[in-house]
Amino acid sequence: MPTTVAFNPLLPEVQQDPYGYYKKMRDEAPLAFIEPLGAWGIFRYEDVSNTFRHPEIFSAKDFITNAFGEFDPVPEVPSIIALDPPDHTRLRRLANKAFLPGAIRAMEPTVQKVIDKLLDEVQAKGGEFDFVHEYAAFIPVGVTAALLGVEDELARGDFKRWTMDLLKAPSRGVLPQDELDRMHQSVAELREYFTKQIEYRRKNPGTDLVSALVKAEEENQTLTAAEVLSLVTLLQFGGSETPSHLITTTLHQLFTHPEALASVRADAGRAITAVDETLRLISPVNFVFQTAVQDVEYADATIPSGSLVFSYISSANRDERVFDDPDVFDMERAASPKHLSFAQGAHYCIGAPLGRMMCAKAVSSALERFPNLRPLEANPEWMPSFWVRGFNRYLVAP
């Protein structure tokens, strides 16, 4: 059996600062059964990377079930994130058509337009503002909505509500019934809206992401309407929560490292380097969950077939066996080895290029618009979450 080390990620003190606990797990219990979560935790870089490289052993098949449960908007087809090769390969090749480098470059004006509009609104209000809830939180939702062809008025209203309700699904077991009823309604409305959009874009293609997915073709194969709907809802879910946290934590890291801040102010292109280092140091997602599809012998223990496995990317990204001075924010850090915040292999995040570009533009544009932007909180409070890593709020002054 693995060494028993007390680790409870549900405790507030762990959620506020988990990295010392991760180090202890890497050193003393790199594989551990986490009783409060009923899952096996893996904590070292090479071991976490191994789970991504071997989906035939550590499967993603239960991801949507664990994340959405009864709130899965498209239960009739398996989501791309819950498929393993070879079934995953066809969908991935088709979906990639919408995320080629040329497609990402074509999205840049749309991204910048969303960011500039939000900065205009913040500037018009004047005075200090909450960087999380008045700026960063609206960028991914606004960008995703714009790329999907959603009207701006709907994006700020129903689309935002649908997204926020879908993001509650992982906590469905502790929510009151009236809230669950609202979530069911939101999922139904979201599905109805995008079903109509997909039908419309098949007949009236545009430059939006829905049209790109509808037009995607590989070896005479195309995506079905249900597959497009599944991809769209996944992009809405995955692209709406974590990027907002990454934008804010990147700014916080720059504020706490004046030389890095000065380099980004002098060269906006450096913002993407700051985003990448923040992704390594403070991944917006602490772990990914997988399912062991066979007994796995590891570290003098056996992970039984069917077990839930949490691969702790936030721990792997600070593994001193791989990274020099892993707890230090360093924009000059060598590019290799890569952080695992976008996963690896077949399930490498399909939206990673878009996410990096969007977050870098959000940070550099805010610094350019407000040359004297400064923080009003030295130690912002982290969200009470064992899965997502982000600030509750971050007060700044222009």
Image (cartoon, grey):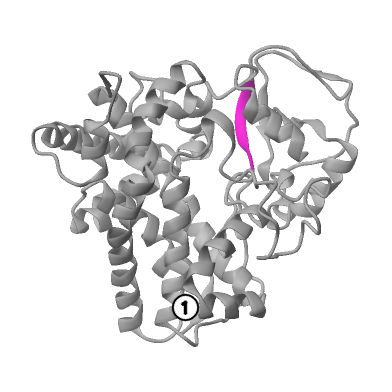
| Extent of the magenta region | 287-291
Residue 182 in the figure: left or right of residue 238: left
Residue 238 in the figure: left or right of residue 270: left
Residue 20 position (above or below residue 342): below
Residue 186 position (above or below residue 152): above
Q: Given the image, on which type of amino acid does mark 1 rest?
A: Leu
Task: Check disc 1 and report the residue beneath it.
Answer: 367
Viewer-nearest residue: 368 or 3: 368
* Number of residue marks: 1
Residue 161 at what x, y percent from top left?
A: 32, 50
The residue depicted at 22 percent of the width and 37 percent of the height is 194
Q: Please, what secondary structure does the residue beneath circle 1 have?
A: helix
Viewer-nearest residue: 385 or 285: 285
Residue 309 location, quadrant? top right
Residue occupying the far left of the picture: 203
In the rendered view of the protein, which quadrant contains the C terminus?
A: bottom left
Estimate how packed mark 1 is, as few (under 14), some (14 to 19) or many (20 or more) residues with alpha carbons within 10 Å: some
Query: What secondary structure is the magenta-colored segment mainly?
Result: strand
